[in-house]
Image (tube, grey):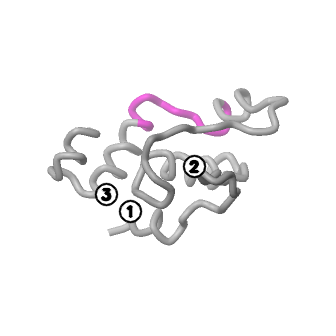
Amino acid sequence: MLYAYKEKRMNEYEYSYKYMELLVKRDVSFKSVIRSFANGLDAIEFLCWERTGDFCHRYILGFLIEKIAQMDVKEITPSGEIIDLPYESIDKWLRK
């Protein structure tokens, strides 16, 4: 899936759809998994080599965690600034 996207055989919308389809197939229950994982923790970090603001699965996952598990998700920039997720871009990737 990642290679298809990187090789331009899949666009952002298609990747987002396939990624969410994969989460459903794997029966990812965000409320139980995320809440049990985060129990007692102040933060959870998702790492990726994509630059801040570039299309990435971590934004899709973060968006879903915020919406389903009702947890606050932020991004830490390379300079250490804490910012909100790029909702305008995420919304574009998820809707077409």
Query: In the rendered view of the protein, which quadrant contains the N terminus?
Result: top left
- Label 3: state its secondary structure: helix
x and y, in percent, of residue 50 in the image: 43, 48
Quickly name the residue at label 3: 12
x and y, in percent, of residue 13 in the image: 31, 59
Q: CA distance from mark 1 to mark 3?
A: 5 Å
Q: Are the residues tagged 1 and 3 within 8 Å (C-beta)?
A: yes
Q: Which mark is residue 93?
A: 1
Q: Residues within 10 Å of mark 2 (few under 14, many from 20)?
A: some
Q: Which residue is located at x 41 percent, y 45 percent?
A: 20
- Label 1: state its secondary structure: helix
What segment carries the magenta color? 23-32
**What is the three-letter code of the residue carrying label 3?**
Glu
Magenta includes 55? no
x and y, in percent, of residue 68 in the image: 62, 49
Q: Are the residues tagged 1 and 2 within 8 Å (C-beta)?
A: no
Q: Please, which residue is most extreme toward the bottom here?
A: 88
Q: Which mark is residue 62?
A: 2
